[in-house]
Amino acid sequence: MQNPLFIPVSVLLAFTFACTPQSKQHEPKGVTSGRAMVVTAHPLASAAGVSVLGKGGNAVDAAVTVELCLAVCYPNAGNIAGGGFMVIRMHDGTAVSLDYREKAPMRASRDMYLDSLGNVIQGSSLHGHRACGVPGTVAGLFEAHRRYGMLPWDELVAPAVRMASEGFPLTEIQAADLNRAGSRLLRINGRKTALTGKGLWHAGDTLVQPELALTLERIRDMGRDGFYRGETARLIMEEMERGKGLISNADLDAYEPVWRTPVTGMYRGYRIISMPPPSSGGVGLLQMLAMVEPFDLGKMGWNRPDAVHVMVESARRMYADRAAYLGDPEFVEIPVEGLLNRDYLKDRMAGFNMRQAGNSSQFGEGDPSAWESEETTHYSIVDPMGNALAGTTTLNGSYGSGVIVKGGGFLLNNQMDDFSIKPGFPNLYGLVGGEANAIAPGKRMLSSMTPTVVEKEGKLFMVLGSPGGSTIITSVFQVLINVIDHHMSMQQAVEAGRFHHQWLPDTLYCENRALDRTCLRTLTKKGHHVRRRGAIGRVDAVLVWPGGILEGGADPRGDDTAMGLEPR
Ligand code: DON
């Protein structure tokens, strides 16, 4: 399951310090501000977001700028031709979520990645033009701004245009990452592009993206139509013809983001507000939290064997349900109420044995009907008015499909791989699925993205989310527990070492040094199949301390940066 596409070696080396257990803290350890906070995967995107807030913009305005800047300065995941989700909690407590997930093109079909014998054509859902879903990002940002934005659209897009045309200095992690991706991008595109133009990249080199700057100018001037119609649409169509892709003008024209009611639930008195299907993130997170709530994780101790065991067993059960029941709610009936029912989840844990690991091969999904009445990037923003926004956006794999639209300068996603391309066949993240997540024209592929906002006593408490494919849900789960059960500060909670289990494969993955030797031995004795792996997730988060002080938690596994708004 370890996936070289999203765990650069440099990242592994960079964060060996991060995995040691943290002592309880009762004060912020990260960047703080009494006014507003932006935490993103890149310092330039964080700075651009803070600047919008300083000019009187709100969290949605800042999100538009942050996400478009990430498309320029974080091209492995930031995007204009991918998709994402936002969970927004306004200062008056109203909570909404926006789904701008990609859709299968109308010409897609259930078995499009299988050969005539019904076998999966290796890599076909991951590389090149046929791997691309209909992009949702620009439509999503435009819609969020239409409903909540305060500053003019063109002002919000301008910083990304500038960054693309003037260039920006690559970080060490980025230079190494681009060098690794170079041959794949050259092979898929058959020509040099801004991302591959120069041979080997070094830290500090300036990456200039003139074609992307022109595309962003069209988006700045024409809004959504600057992407889905006119010149940009024409360039996408030419690209589709070149690589026999399936996206048509009609697909682009018909793409619509959807406002959805977030899924919500309580955990130890905190109200969790998260992303509903077609993401499995919110449902999965709430399921696991409810399954572990009867156990005193705080008393068991951070990353001690019993605490890890309980959390892993909740994950095993959740991922089995995910594979069976979750998909696009417009296409499949999802028993969300049953899946989140406390009695159902109690029943799911009925066979739990503190001394013995479950066995995934003898363990399937539950029957919630009886109770019925995921390279990505995440950013967290709290504005001076107290509005909060958790946004996660993705091309899926690092640099998506690898296809860079000629003349447009932007990467297309490979989100089609998030469908279950054949029942039981693992996707990029090792996830398996079935009918609920089978390909159908116009359907959204199931996601694990988990943008989440947490309330305490009716007030904003935390904003968080992560990239990491299937490990997103368990990463968010652990960071929440680190703060709520283990009383860590936000920065400590995101730094702390993490582990992951997803039912199948029946393996307990842990970051180097996340679990000490005794813990590993005890877990192995209980029957867990433990394997070390590189970084799990990359959580960017904000915590509200008593008195309203905001603490940013920026994940040291990447270049992630928290920036607060300076006092007036
Ligand atoms: O939507 C999903 O769940 C995946 N496409 C997310 C991919 C991802 O997080 C890659 N990042 N490291």
Image (cartoon, helix red, strand yellow):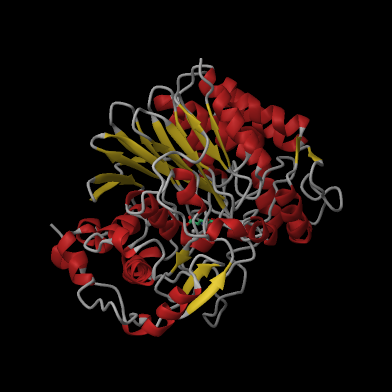
Query: Hey, which quadrant is residue 117 in on the image?
Result: bottom right
Q: Is residue 102 visible?
A: no
Q: Nearer the viewer, residue 553 or 212?
A: 553
Q: Nearer the viewer, residue 10 or 252?
A: 10
At a point 19% along the width and 74% down the height, the residue shown is: 350
Image position, residue 357 (x, y; %): 34, 80
Residue at the top extreme, as displayed: 568
Query: Hey, which quadrant is residue 289 in on the image?
Result: bottom left
Image position, residue 324 (x, y; %): 33, 69
Image position, residue 183 (x, y; %): 78, 61
Is residue 494 left or right of 75 when viewed as pictured? left
- Up-down relation of residue 529 to residue 130 (above or below): below
- Up-down relation of residue 310 to residue 564 (above or below): below
At a point 55% along the width and 48% down the height, the residue shown is: 555
Q: Nearer the viewer, residue 219 or 468?
A: 468
- Up-down relation of residue 353 to residue 129 (above or below): below
Q: Is residue 469 visible?
A: yes
Q: For the N terminus, which image quadrant?
A: bottom right
At a point 45% along the width and 19% down the height, the residue shown is: 150
Image position, residue 45 (x, y; %): 61, 35
Is residue 289 left or right of 488 when viewed as pictured? left
- Up-down relation of residue 415 to residue 27 (above or below): below
The number of callouts visible is 0
